[in-house]
Image: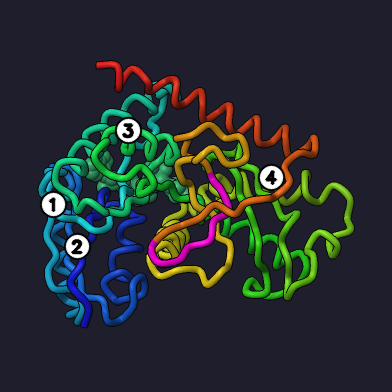
């Protein structure tokens, strides 16, 4: 058996966490030889529900789950955490402006970043799921200056899976045949889902899709608006698919992708002209617990340029809106 790791999960009584926790404890994320302690954070008013979640976890008698506890204190939840899933966020309520949403979440993620900085493992690996995920990840990263910036990431894997699945359906091949998908930018409708480099069993996907305008009129809108379509159909936002994406994001980051490309929102190192520090969706390859941004892809055509500028500008605006947090 490996050394026990501590996994902190925020928003732990919410619907995504409910679809995540049991799979993690079952060993789906890090393997069936990785014991763990789960450290669950939610608001004071959610503690009662959280008690029920923990009772259910106990009733699973998971062999890998050495302990699980609940708290409303970020410094307790993040103590010595090796991994942190930041799922909890303030949802947009009726009449709330985008700026209010950003501000409410900024406060949450600033506090959580400071707590991680103070008490988490010095190599804690963080994935932010709560929206606006990229900017929230940026805030946590900036609020945790003693931790490596590269350890703060945002979830774009759900968008990546949605893109792969749309293409697989279009060309009538299995999802496992598809490689080299990219989703650039923000986890928002401005994202640039891009299959120009994608292959299916080694053949170019682009060459297989001959229908003109399928990319701009079907594929990109379908990927970008999938979250809204799920809400319309289910009456609730994506939960199981978001949970699945979060688990695979972390599994691949920690255990590697064997040379395959996946999409992660990561702080830019200046690649592709994206300003350093902007948390941006990039194609990455993971190995030995580290990710590397795939280099050398051509984004110089007019369409790609427009899409990258659109999503980057949105992120820069969000970042500008939260700068005052760091001026204090
Ligand atoms: P729920 O409303 O079911 O759960 C959110 C939980 O977070 C609640 O239990 C709430 O009490 C808790 N919470 C709020 N503030 C907190 C704080 N300061 N500390 C700890 N916990 C706190 O939402 P759910 O459906 O689970 O979605 C969670 C977040 O994921 C939302 O922001 C949602 O927009 C976002 N999503 C992100 C996706 C992505 O791909 N990045 C896709 C799915 C989802 O839309």
SS for dot 1? loop
- Is mark 2 in CB contact (under 8 Å) with mark 1? yes
Magenta region includes residue 287: yes
Q: Compare marks 4 and 3 and give the one earlier in the sequence.
A: 3
Label 1 belongs to which residue? 79
Instruction: Work out whether 243 lies above or below 187.
Output: below
Question: What is the C-alpha distance between the residues marked 4 and 3?
Answer: 32 Å
Q: Give the range drawn in magenta.
A: 281-289
Label 1 neighbour load within 10 Å: few <14, some 14-19, many 20+:
some
Please name which of the two marks, 2 or 4, marks the residue nearer to the observer: 2
Question: What is the C-alpha distance between the residues marked 3 and 2?
Answer: 23 Å
Label 3 belongs to which residue? 142
Question: What is the C-alpha distance between the residues marked 1 and 4?
Answer: 41 Å
Q: Compare marks 3 and 1 and give the one earlier in the sequence.
A: 1
Beta carbon of the mark 1 residue lies under 8 A of ligand 1:
no
Q: Compare marks 2 and 4 and give the one earlier in the sequence.
A: 2
Question: What is the C-alpha distance between the residues marked 3 and 1?
Answer: 19 Å
Q: Which of 182 and 166 is in front in this view?
A: 182
Q: Name the quadrant containing residue 267.
A: top left
Instruction: Work out whether 111 lies above or below 3.
Output: above
Q: Compare marks 3 and 2 and give the one earlier in the sequence.
A: 2
Residue 236 seen: no
The residue drawn where x is 42% and y is 59% is: 290
Residue 162 lies, in percent from the top left, at 60, 57
Question: What is the C-alpha distance between the residues marked 2 and 1?
Answer: 9 Å
Residue 235 lies, in percent from the top left, at 47, 50
Colouring chosen for the image of the structure? rainbow
Magenta region includes residue 133: no
Label 2 belongs to which residue? 6
């Amino acid at each position: 058996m490996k050394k026990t790791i501590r996994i902190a999960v925020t928003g732990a009584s919410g619907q995504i966490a409910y679809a995540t926790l049991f799979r993690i404890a079952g060993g789906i994320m890090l393997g069936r030889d990785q014991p763990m302690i789960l450290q669950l954070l939610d608001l004071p008013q959610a503690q009662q529900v959280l008690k029920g979640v923990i009772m259910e976890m106990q009733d699973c008698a998971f062999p890998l789950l050495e302990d699980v506890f609940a708290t409303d204190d970020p410094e307790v939840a993040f103590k010595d955490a090796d991994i942190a899933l930041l799922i909890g966020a303030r949802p947009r309520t009726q009449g709330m402006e985008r700026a209010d949403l950003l501000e409410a979440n900024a406060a949450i993620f600033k506090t959580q970043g400071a707590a991680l900085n103070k008490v988490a493992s010095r190599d804690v690996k963080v994935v932010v799921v709560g929206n606006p995920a990229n900017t929230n990840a940026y805030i946590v990263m900036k609020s945790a200056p003693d931790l490596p910036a590269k350890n703060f990431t945002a979830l774009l894997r759900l968008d990546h899976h949605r893109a792969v699945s749309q293409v697989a359906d279009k060309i009538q091949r299995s999802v496992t045949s598809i490689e080299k998908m990219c989703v650039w930018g923000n986890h928002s409708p401005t994202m640039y889902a891009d299959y120009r480099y994608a292959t299916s069993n080694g053949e170019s996907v682009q060459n297989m899709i001959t229908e003109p305008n399928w990319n701009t009129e079907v594929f990109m809108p379908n990927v970008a608006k999938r979250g809204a379509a799920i809400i319309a159909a289910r009456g609730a936002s994506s939960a199981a698919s978001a949970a699945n994406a979060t688990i695979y994001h972390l599994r691949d980051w920690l255990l590697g992708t064997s040379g395959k490309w996946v999409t992660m929102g990561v702080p830019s190192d200046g690649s592709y002209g994206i300003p350093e520090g902007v948390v941006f969706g990039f194609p990455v390859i993971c190995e030995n617990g580290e990710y590397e941004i795939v280099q050398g892809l051509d984004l110089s055509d007019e369409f790609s340029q427009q899409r990258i500028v659109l999503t980057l500008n949105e992120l820069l605006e969000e970042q500008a809106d939260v700068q005052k947090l760091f001026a204090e």
